[in-house]
Amino acid sequence: MKTFCGRANPTTGAMEWLEEDENYDYHQEIARSRYADMLHDKDRNTKYYQGIRAAVSRVKERGEKAIVLDIGTGTGLLSMMAASAGADFCYAIEVFKPMANAAVKIVEKNGFRDKIKVINKHSTEVTVGPDGDMQCRANILVTELFDTELIGEGALPTYEHAHKYLVQEGCEAVPHRATVYVQLVESKRMWSWNKLFPVHVEAEDGEKIIVSPSEMENCPGVPSVCDIQLNQMPSSDFTILSDVVTMFSVDFSKPVRSASTYYRVQLEPVKSGKAQIVLSWWDIDMDPSGMISCTMAPYWVKSTSAFQWRDHWMQCVYFLPNEEPVLQGEKVYLTACRDQYSVWYKLEKARGDEENKADVRVESPVCRCQAHLLWNRPRFGELNDQNRTQQYVKSLMKVLKTDSVCLCISDGSLLPVLAHYLGAKQVQYFFLVFRSLRFTLGFLFFKANHLEDKIKIIEARPELLTSSHLEDKKISVLVGEPFFTTSLLPWHNLYFWYARTAVTSHLTSNVTVLPQSASLHMMIVEFQDLWRIRSPCGTCEGFDVQTMDDMINNSLNFRESKEAEPHPLWEYPCKSLSDPQKVLTFDFRKTVPQHCLSTEGSVNLLRKGKSHGAVLWMEYHLAADISVNTGLMQISNEKVFLQPNLLCQSVYFFSSVIESETLSDLPSTVTYAINFDTKTGEIAMDFKL
């Protein structure tokens, strides 16, 4: 059975209706899941197994039958651990039907059919009683409902319901408790992901400063956590302002409240500075004594020898509403507010005891400037990259003339302001937008820089642009970064090319297009850890989970195995096995061609290692000898250094991996075939080792 799905094509900009298999969403969710990452997490699995054994033993020592409730069972792994540890019966709940079906097969394959019942329901729909899903309440509660923020996947309301309706009072819980830790830091790099810094531009008539609107300066942002691999953040990129302190903890063996609340701790800064960021992570204790513990603490807190790489649980970066100056030894209060699914923080100076004991209003921050709704964290970092901005400044100085008429096509871009400051006063600039948020943000930005009457915002899609929009002028300079908020993969920003094609009739015959072209680059790499998210597991803690491997592989083959996927590669170290290679070029000076752009070739493997996949990125050629690279920075001793803030880097994982211990083992080349379909804007790839 087929179904029609509507989608906005990020590359062409067209609204499309696609005929999809009825199970397309299932396949997509499975293919892009982190199940393999979790199954490869040896530390997690070992600690869960130890905690479950201990919990079953405690129940048995009391002379009771061990009845286990496993919420969010996934593969059924934790239930099988419980059954192996001597549990009398396990109820394994899994709401995602394909996953529940896989769990049934895995449970049967491992010989636990009579000990484990898989229930394909949301836990809040499970019934207890002689005719219910569960014969009786459980006395052991086992779950893995956590994300990087701990509560983002709905752990609190799930636990709250389970304690009320599904488990006995005083039940054992694995994990037993979770503890959230925080540390206050100053970091220009991380703060650049949340606020827009002033931009200094050297123009012919002196230095100009582009400032952000007061609405943006004073905006508290949004309560969404920035979860990253904090272990890849060098210590030189932040200054520690406080010791690590416990913010709050949750005892899962007792009734849990999910209602909004707050927690407050007193901090004594160990160093003076600007408090901008709260770094946070959590530990889970699998037993009441805390002897079996699993920690997400970053490298400067725990020994690197105990480091376990994982991508399903990372660390949290929270941005304070505004930076606050703190003095060494002068106490401050840090408040964590939470609702059922998210946490946010605020910092206050220590005042009188009565004032500090006053109740805190637990209200989620609301973005007032639109920027935090329009731009994600890497986009803020991109706009704050002065070196990148300087490349655009140099290019604009080359192409702008005293009689230029300029049109900018990009989302939330500084280019119109840069173009104005670098051109003559009589130049007319137009800023094309076609979504209301972008219009609002653009207006606020131009107003803050007193340019409302200098730059005209056109609220129209490129194909609907008319001469009256342009006051009957022809565009002589067309500019774009390009950047569009709908872009996930490197080539999605080629939407600029399609927009340029749509406005062709409004361009002069000798129009200057900036960037004049783009090129797609790639390199074969060995990942230090990222390979785990696509690697089959086979067995996990002695249990056969091959069915899960097969299911993921089947869903990948449904479509995703032929596609690249986005990853911010600075978080995932890799080693280059080949030199970088340019594979496709897109000439923006011409319109999008009717025919496909295809290339075939080979990449020489120059270094020994495991060929996990190809990393891909775009380079934009702004003007003669001036380019902006969105991927590679440098290769040093085979290690790849990728741009730290930039979006739209991607990975194509190879379906098989070849390991070469010596150069003589190396296959001489990896062959590739890449096809860019100009009608759909999609790139198809095929690699052969």
Image: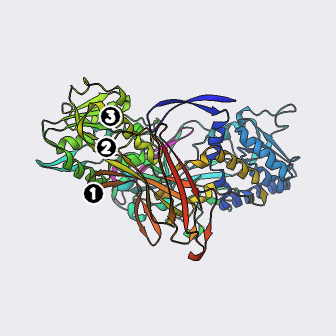
Q: How many marks?
A: 3
Tell me whether circle 1 and circle 2 mark residues in contact (CB < 8 Å): no
Label 1 sits on residue: 625
Few, some or many residues within 10 Å of mark 1 (<14, 14–19, 20+) = few
Q: Which amino acid does label 2 sit on?
A: Arg
- Name the quarter where the C terminus is drawn: bottom right
Quarter of image, res 463: top left
Few, some or many residues within 10 Å of mark 3 (<14, 14–19, 20+) = many
Image coordinates for residue 277, horizontal then vertical, percent: 41, 52
Asked if residue 369 can be seen in this view, the reply is no
**Main SS category, magenta section:** strand
Decide: is 136 above or below 468: below
Q: What residue type is labelled 1?
A: Asp
Decide: is 6 above or below 75: above
Q: What residue type is labelled 3?
A: Leu
Secondary element at image label 2 = loop
In the shown orientation, is residue 54 left or right of residue 686?
right
Report the front residue among 623 and 83. Answer: 623
Q: Disc 2 versus disc 3: distance between alpha carbons?
A: 29 Å
Label 3 sits on residue: 441
Residue 56: assigned label: none
Image coordinates for residue 113, horizontal then vertical, percent: 86, 47
Q: Disc 3 versus disc 1: distance between alpha carbons?
A: 32 Å
In the shown orientation, is residue 367 left or right of residue 342?
left
Image coordinates for residue 9, horizontal then vertical, percent: 48, 35
Which portion, as a residue range, is magenta?
Answer: 323-349
Secondary element at image label 3 = helix
